[in-house]
Amino acid sequence: MTGVTQKFVGLDALCKYYQERGIKASVLPDKSPEAVEKGHIKQDMGYIKVAGREFDLVTIRWKGTTRGSYDLGKVGGIPIATKDKIPFEYHHIFRAEIANEGAAKAKLKKKTKGIVGKEVIDVSWEGGRLAEMLNSNNEINSAILRFIQNEDGMKIEPDKKNKIFRIVYSRPTELKFGLAHGFKFDRRLLPKEAIDVMDKIAIVTRKSLKS
């Protein structure tokens, strides 16, 4: 299995998952002009093109491989194997002009109860103007509480250079398969309710650019 093929093992399954949700989605071919990252050094695992939603592209990243949080052997950015839990990041991307990156950033904070198996009982957002707008949106935050777990993460990252926003949802899992088998998408890592939340967050983010 080649490195390029491995990138799409997980994307094909994730694309099918979106299609089953009634979303028009297709995997972009390698070196597509619609791809965000260009050149040989890439952190994204390829892209799924989406129609009829507020986000345009979906991709997957291993959080640990991009930020040095984990000591992984890797080839072409793909982990070989590990017994640690790796936060898989699902990036929902849309294109937009960004004037102020600071105002457009937001990160989810969770309030929990319990010592073992902490239960998330409330969420809020920290950041700039966008965070303020999300904190006032009870619909989105109530929806998040229905699926969020203590180890999960959510954030909105503006990328002024590439003129995109990344709405990121992450959930840790143990990588059991490694390089020989490629990445296999696990439906438990991306609750279907999270997809609708990404869509609603994109709407609020677009509104924040006009305010």
Image (tube, rainbow, N blue to C red):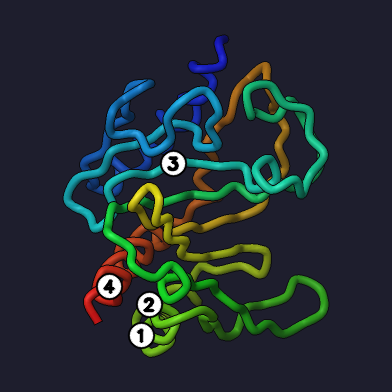
Helix, strand or loop for disc 4: helix
Q: CA distance from mark 3 to mark 4?
A: 23 Å
Instruction: State the residue position of label 1.
Output: 137
Which numbered marker is on residue 54?
none
Badge 1 amino acid? Asn
Vertical side of 128 occupied by 163: above or below: above
First in sequence: mark 1 or mark 4? 1
Which of the two marks, 2 or 4, is nearer to us in this view? 4
Which numbered marker is on residue 209?
4
Q: Are marks 1 and 2 in contact (CB under 8 Å)?
A: yes
Badge 3 amino acid? Thr
Helix, strand or loop for disc 3: strand
Q: CA distance from mark 1 to mark 2?
A: 6 Å
Instruction: State the residue position of label 2.
Output: 140
Instruction: State the residue position of label 3.
Output: 59
Residue pictured at 75% horizontal, 71% vertical? 117
Percent x, y of residue 168: 48, 57
